[in-house]
Image (cartoon, rainbow, N blue to C red):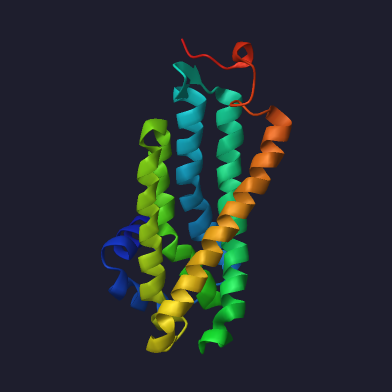
Amino acid sequence: MNLIERVKNIIITPKTEWDVINGESTTPPMLLTSYVIPMALIPAVATFIGMGLIGVDVFGIKVGGIKYGLALGIMSFLGSIVSYYVSTYVIDALAPTFKSEKDINKSAQLVAYSSTAAYVAGIFSILPALSFLGILALYAIYLFYIGLPKLKKTPQDQVVVYMVVGALIIIVVSVVVNLILTKVVYSIVGNPFAMGMDDLFKFK
């Protein structure tokens, strides 16, 4: 599998690409190393550059610094990996409820590849002012919707419900994981937005 081709195809021609993916054999660990980790580096590196080298305006003061950029980048990276695994197992456990096939490998493919849009949208973190464009990650919900009947053999009358429940779970998992990681990271390096003005990292 060519990484760049997979990213391009799953975003531009998801219907046909899901058919190709369905014919592939893989496992959650294999997908982690071959796809999730490389893709998770996109938002992680972008976050590091955005907060570590560029910074964000807070009341006219540029806030950031290498320490925070690195911490937030690591947080983003670990969050992507944990969310991938938790979401995969939850989606698979829910499969019988929606008359779908319980197959952890297919669930891993569904979660990993439908998350492509979110990984790619993470590039906007490189410029904090453009971070709102991360909303394009919502395209991942559509990718998930298209992939369900192909990978999980979900009946048509169950697709929308499974998609909604699955998407909500993935979003909630991501939010919870990031909140936990945020607390851990800020407990180590401090919260740049809650510090005194004299302690803020100022970019010249």
Residue 72: x %, y % from top left = 58, 36
Residue 138: x %, y % from top left = 38, 57
4 w.r.t. 61: above or below: below
Furthest residue in direction left, as rendered: 12
53 w.r.t. 176: above or below: above
Tally of numbered discs? 0
Image quadrant where residue 90 sits: bottom right
Left/right placement of residue 89 relative to residue 17 reads right
Q: Residue at x 57, y 53 (%)?
A: 175
94 w.r.t. 173: above or below: below
174 w.r.t. 109: above or below: above
Residue 151: x %, y % from top left = 44, 80
Of residues 3 and 92, which is closer to you in this image? 92
Quadrant position of the N terminus in the picture: bottom left
* Residue 34 seen from this side: yes
* Residue 104 seen from this side: no
Image quadrant where residue 105 sits: bottom right
Furthest residue in direction front, as rendered: 59
Left/right placement of residue 121 relative to residue 71 reads left
Of residues 172 and 7, which is closer to you in this image? 172
Q: Which residue is drawn at 36% across and 67% down?
A: 142
